[in-house]
């Protein structure tokens, strides 16, 4: 039994089928990278794992428990699975500290003092303790994304989903976010990330999945996918990436 | 188009600045015109004041003071002329940089003088309009003793406007929210309700308020509708205003909640916050900030529209003023009520502008 099991998941928006039978297994402490052309359904898949979108068919299991379909307590699931998006993550009307403590206080019923102590510890870790009282629009994009990650971590998730969290950032801000992810990976955090940062995927991924036409077209260790792809489509996609200078 | 000669055109030697002296002279002419107009208007004013036994050395001194003010315009004009002279001198010495700098300076001062001159001229022309017909125009709107004697009566009636819009605003806040929620009810089951709510907002936003008031406040008692038929006209008017403005305010609420980026919903729900917690901690606090300015704008419009209730016979400030005006053949009492309306609406308008400015700064930051 894998930690996260995605079995034959379909997702339809009206007549348009985005996911056409995705199968994927993620083990604990693995970092799985989803790559693929824009619009191939990476974000959709991540949102389905988190229950932000209901799937049309198939099932997803976390630690053996079914987390999709009727009768699932989504709010409980989300305590175990954190997600960070490309942008607009932080609540602009709350300070950094309030952003990080909101869910622990309201959802986990932690005392405010305890939540704040933990939040400060996490902020110290990313070197932003001085910004605890600042508002999101006073932070750089990279700082905002790191706070968003910390906010997800404050819920002590067992699985972290990251959806192209660096693609809205200026190049010089990307590295500070990636190095935080690198640390998390080294600590054994289980992560599934959609990314266009191929060299990063190559460096940290335990497994890389190439999504094409609504299914996992090819998966394997990064050395295989980037060094010796088996499928014609994977090769075509990667050569385009290389042309664009991103690998 | 002619082919461009590579030795000419934009890349050729810097052009010689145009002499700014004509513009400076225009500024001088405008300045002179303003001074003449000011004296002409002020002399007229003095004549009228004297005829009304309102003259006096103090007032004359004040008038002379006002008449001297336009002379301040000479300061920028003189600066402009001086810079123009320096520009010409620079040009004579082939010092193109000085010439350009001084030309720009001269133009700027000349434009400054012309702009201010035009504004001052407009002010004096406005005063002249009030003085026309030997002061009859002014007296029609501003007969001081009539304003003084009718002020108490008008103010008392004006309180009715204030009371009506205060009561109506409370009802509108609630009613608008009901309509807004009805328009947002999700799912197939909510469709008929959404449709009705949409129809309602379309109808009452499309209808002139005065017609809504007429139809509701006059029509309901005429149709002998139970309960409502016994209401005094004030309450019927409040009902009409609530129904009418509820439609506008519902749209304000809806637009405010809609304006929050859907990612904020996703972000909050993904942290495990429930639907209600998301609304309470994340969506509403952000929406309120965007709702308040347009809401206040609608309320300002409502406050002014309380003057429409005279069509159903409520004696409000405007109606009272109209009665006085037709008795005295003079509009000064209406001026009073106009000033009262401005007294309460203008500060609110300024406040809304400040809020919008803050919001803009905040979202830009
Ligand atoms: N709410 C929705 N309604 C209808 N179609 C949608 C919706 N959300 C996504 N889609 C469609 O589903 C497809 C997959 O979208 P998704 O955002 O998952 O792609 P992606 O792989 O994340 O792309 P990108 O790399 O650009 O982020 C797209 O064609 C998109 O138009
Ligand atoms: Mg995406």
Image (cartoon, helix red, strand yellow):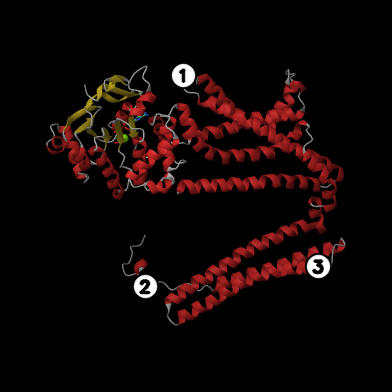
| Residue at point 15%, 32% (across, down) | A232
* In-front residue for pair B161/B28: B161
| Residue at point 26%, 20% (across, down) | A64
* In-front residue for pair B166/B252: B166
Query: Residue B363: image x %, image y %?
Result: 47, 45
Mark positioned earlier in the residue sequence (3 or 2): 2
Find numbered disc 3 in the image and state the secondary structure of the residue it sits on.
helix
Query: Residue A109: image x %, image y %?
Result: 43, 29
The vertical placement of B151 against B3, above or below, is above
Asked whether, in this view, residue B24 is left or right of residue B275, the answer is right
The answer to whether one can see residue A51 in this image is no
* In-front residue for pair B307/A44: A44
Mark 2 is surrounded, within 10 Å at the Cα level, by few (under 14), some (14 to 19) or many (20 or more) other residues, namely few
Residue that badge 3 annotates: B58
Query: Residue A17: image x %, image y %?
Result: 30, 24
Query: Residue B155: image x %, image y %?
Result: 79, 43
Q: Are marks 1 and 3 on the same chain?
A: yes
Q: Quadrant of the N terminus of chain B?
A: bottom left
Mark 3 is surrounded, within 10 Å at the Cα level, by few (under 14), some (14 to 19) or many (20 or more) other residues, namely few
Which image quadrant for residue B321?
top right
Q: Nearer the viewer, mark 3 or mark 2?
A: 3
State how far apart marks 3 and 2 are (Cα): 62 Å
Q: Are marks 1 and 3 in contact (CB under 8 Å)?
A: no
What mark, if any, has residue B13 been given in the picture? 2
Mark positioned earlier in the residue sequence (1 or 3): 3
| Residue at point 66%, 47% (across, down) | B346
Residue that badge 1 annotates: B188
Give the chain letter at badge 3. B
State how far apart marks 1 and 3 are (Cα): 78 Å
């Amino acid at each position: 039994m894998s930690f996260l099991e995605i079995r034959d998941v379909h997702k339809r928006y009206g007549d348009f089928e985005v996911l056409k039978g995705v199968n994927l297994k993620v083990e604990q402490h693995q970092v799985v990278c989803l790559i693929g052309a824009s619009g191939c359904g990476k974000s959709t898949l991540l949102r389905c794992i988190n229950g932000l979108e209901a799937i049309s068919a198939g099932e997803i299991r976390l630690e053996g428990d079914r987390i999709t379909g009727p009768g699932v307590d989504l709010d409980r699931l989300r305590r175990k699975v954190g997600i960070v998006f490309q942008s607009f993550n932080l609540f602009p009307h709350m300070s950094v500290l309030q952003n990080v403590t909101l869910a622990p206080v309201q959802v986990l019923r932690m005392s405010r003092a305890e939540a704040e102590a933990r939040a400060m510890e996490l902020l110290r870790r990313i070197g932003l303790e001085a910004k605890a009282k600042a508002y999101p629009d006073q932070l750089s994009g990279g700082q905002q994304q790191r706070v968003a990650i910390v906010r997800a971590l404050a819920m002590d998730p067992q699985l972290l989903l990251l959806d192209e969290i660096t693609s809205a950032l200026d190049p010089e801000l990307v590295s500070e976010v990636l190095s935080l992810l690198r640390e998390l990976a080294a600590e054994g955090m289980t992560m599934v990330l959609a990314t266009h940062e191929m060299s990063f995927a190559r460096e940290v991924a335990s497994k890389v999945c190439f999504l094409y036409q609504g299914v996992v077209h090819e998966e394997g260790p990064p050395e295989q996918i980037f060094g010796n792809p088996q499928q014609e489509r994977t090769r075509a996609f990667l050569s385009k990436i290389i042309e664009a200078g991103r690998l | 188009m002619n082919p461009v000669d590579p030795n000419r055109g934009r890349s050729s030697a810097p052009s010689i600045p145009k002499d700014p002296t004509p513009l400076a002279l225009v500024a001088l002419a405008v300045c002179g015109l303003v001074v003449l107009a000011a004296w002409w208007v002020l002399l007229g004013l003095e004549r009228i004041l004297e005829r009304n036994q309102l003259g006096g050395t103090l007032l004359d001194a004040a008038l002379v003071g006002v008449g001297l003010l336009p002379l301040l315009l000479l300061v920028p004009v003189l600066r402009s002329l001086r810079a123009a002279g320096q520009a010409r001198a620079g040009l004579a010495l082939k010092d193109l940089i000085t010439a350009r700098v001084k030309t720009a300076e001269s133009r700027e001062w000349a434009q400054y003088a012309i702009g201010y001159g035009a504004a001052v001229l407009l002010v004096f022309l406005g005063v002249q309009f009030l003085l026309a017909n030997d002061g009859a125009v002014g007296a029609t709107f501003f007969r001081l003793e009539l304003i003084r004697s009718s002020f108490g009566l008008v103010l008392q009636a004006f309180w009715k406007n204030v009371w009506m819009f205060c009561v109506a605003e409370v009802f509108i806040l609630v009613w608008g929210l009901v309509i807004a929620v009805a328009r947002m009810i999700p799912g197939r089951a909510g469709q008929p309700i959404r449709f009705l709510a949409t129809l309602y907002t379309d109808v009452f936003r499309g209808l002139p308020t005065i017609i809504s008031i007429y139809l509701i406040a006059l029509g309901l008692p005429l149709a002998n509708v139970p309960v409502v038929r016994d209401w005094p006209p004030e309450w019927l008017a409040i009902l009409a205003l609530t129904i009418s403005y509820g439609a506008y305010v519902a749209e304000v609420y809806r637009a405010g909640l809609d304006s929050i980026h859907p990612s904020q919903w996703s972000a909050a729900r993904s942290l495990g916050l429930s639907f209600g917690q998301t609304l309470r901690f994340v969506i509403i606090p952000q929406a309120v900030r965007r709702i308040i300015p347009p809401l206040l704008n609608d309320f300002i419009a409502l406050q002014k529209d309380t003057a429409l209730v005279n069509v159903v016979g409520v004696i409000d400030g405007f109606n009272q003023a109209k009665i006085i005006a037709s008795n005295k053949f003079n509009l000064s009492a209406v001026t009073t009520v106009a000033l009262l309306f401005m007294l309460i609406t203008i500060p609110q308008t300024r406040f809304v502008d400040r809020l919008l400015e803050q919001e803009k700064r905040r979202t830009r930051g």
